[in-house]
Amino acid sequence: MHTVFCFKMFVVIEVAGQSHGLQTVESKFVLVKAQNETDAYAKLEKFNQKYAKPYPNDNGEAVRWRVEKSVGCNQTYLTNFACQNQVDEEVVEVYSELAKRKLNADRIWLGE
C-alpha cells in the first residue's frame, strides 16, 4: 500500500544567458505517492531531473524550471491519488504561486 507525502518546493525559471532584470520563481506543493519517506525522496529527485530538462522558448532561448530548494516532507493521511501528469503519475502539483526576484550574478544560468 502506498502513502502520500507532501513536499514544499522552490523552483527558479532560468533563461540561458539572462544576466539582468527579474527572474521568475515558483513556490509550490507537490504530492508524492511512495512506500515510505526514503522512497518519496527518491521519486521526487527523479521527477525533478525530468522537470528541469531545458526546452526552447518562443524566442529560441533555452529555458529550464530548476528546483532550487525542497523543504520538508510530511506524510499525509492519503493513501492514493489519481493523476494524469505528463511528467510522472506518482507526483502531482497541488499548489503553485509565481513571483519575481532580482537576478543577481550568482543566479545566472549559462545554459550548460
Image (cartoon, rainbow, N blue to C red):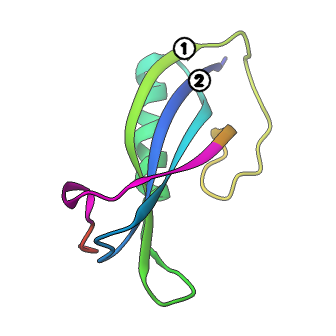
Among the 4 quarters of the image, the one containing residue 66: bottom left
* 32 up-or-down from 22: above or below: above
Does label 2 or label 1 sit earlier along the sequence? 2
Q: Regarding mark 2 in the picture, which secondary structure is present there?
A: strand
Q: Is residue 107 magenta?
A: yes
Find residue 27 and report its image quarter.
top right
**As drawn, 100 above or below 4:** below
Residue 62 lies left or right of residue 107; in this view the side is right
Q: Quadrant of the C terminus?
A: bottom left
* Label 2 packing within 10 angstroms: few (<14), some (14-19), many (20+): many
Magenta residues, as a range?
Answer: 97-108
Q: Position of residue 42 (x, y in %)?
A: 40, 34
Residue at which label 1 appears: 74
Magenta-colored stretch includes residue 43: no
Could you say which disc has been placed on residue 6 in the image?
Answer: 2
Q: Amino acid at mark 1?
A: Asn
Tally the numbered discs: 2
Q: Are marks 2 and 1 in contact (CB under 8 Å)?
A: yes
Marks 2/1: CA–CA distance: 5 Å
Q: Position of residue 91 (x, y in %)?
A: 61, 39
* Residue 63, percent from left and from top: 44, 72
Residue at the farthest bottom position: 60
Is the residue 90 above or below the residue 71 in the image? Answer: below
Q: Residue at x 39, y 67 (%)?
A: 21
For the point 45% across and 26% down, the residue is 39
Judge by depth and name the residue closer to the eye, 7 or 85. Answer: 7
Please tell me whether mark 1 sits on a helix, a strand or a loop: strand
